[in-house]
Amino acid sequence: MTVIKINAITVPEGSGDELAHRFAARAGAVDGAPGFEGFELLKPTDDRTQWLVLTRWASEDDFRAWTSSPSFAEGHRTAAERAGGDAPKPVSTHSEVWSYEVAGGSKG
């Protein structure tokens, strides 16, 4: 059964483009992880300040294995950090991870 992980990231007004840029810079970093099924970065289209990072996993164990892997740590470093520089200032002010499983739907 697919496990859904949603990272709800609170982003101050005017910082969303930078968040999207940082995600684009590491696109594909998780693609080869065992059990990984897909990823979307969801941008709010109303006045909300929460962006959602939605990932799908074959199992909870696959997700946990990825979060404890060296590739998880490396994928969350910026290009500047990988080059030996300082980490940039955080874009978000808050983040929390929500967990769900698929309970129904359609194949539409």
Image (tube, rainbow, N blue to C red):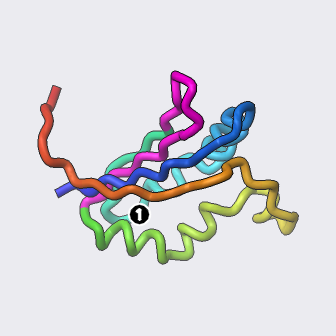
In the rendered image, the residue lying farthest to the right is 85
The relative height of residue 70 versus residue 37 in the rendered view (above or below) is below
Label 1 crowd bin: few (<14), some (14–19), many (20+), radius 10 Å: some
Residue 80: image location, x then y, percent: 81, 58
The relative height of residue 107 versus residue 76 in the rendered view (above or below) is above
Residue 25: image location, x then y, percent: 66, 46
Q: Residue at x 65, y 42 (%)?
A: 11
The relative height of residue 87 versus residue 19 in the rendered view (above or below) is below
First to last magenta residue range: 42-58
Residue 19: image location, x then y, percent: 66, 42
In the rendered image, the residue lying farthest to the front is 47
The relative height of residue 67 versus residue 96 in the rendered view (above or below) is below
Residue named by callout 1: 33
Determine whether the residue tagged by mark 1 lies in a helix, strand or loop: loop
Residue 89: image location, x then y, percent: 80, 54
Is 43 included in the stretch rendered in magenta? yes
**Looking at the image, which is closer to me, 43 or 71?**
43
Left or right: where 65 falls relative to 94: left
Looking at numbered disc 1 in the image, what kind of residue is underneath it?
Ala
**Looking at the image, which is closer to me, 76 or 14?**
14
Q: Residue at x 22, y 54 (%)?
A: 101
**Looking at the image, which is closer to me, 108 or 46?**
46
**Looking at the image, which is closer to me, 85 or 3?**
3
Q: Residue at x 60, y 61 (%)?
A: 75
Is 90 included in the stretch rendered in magenta? no
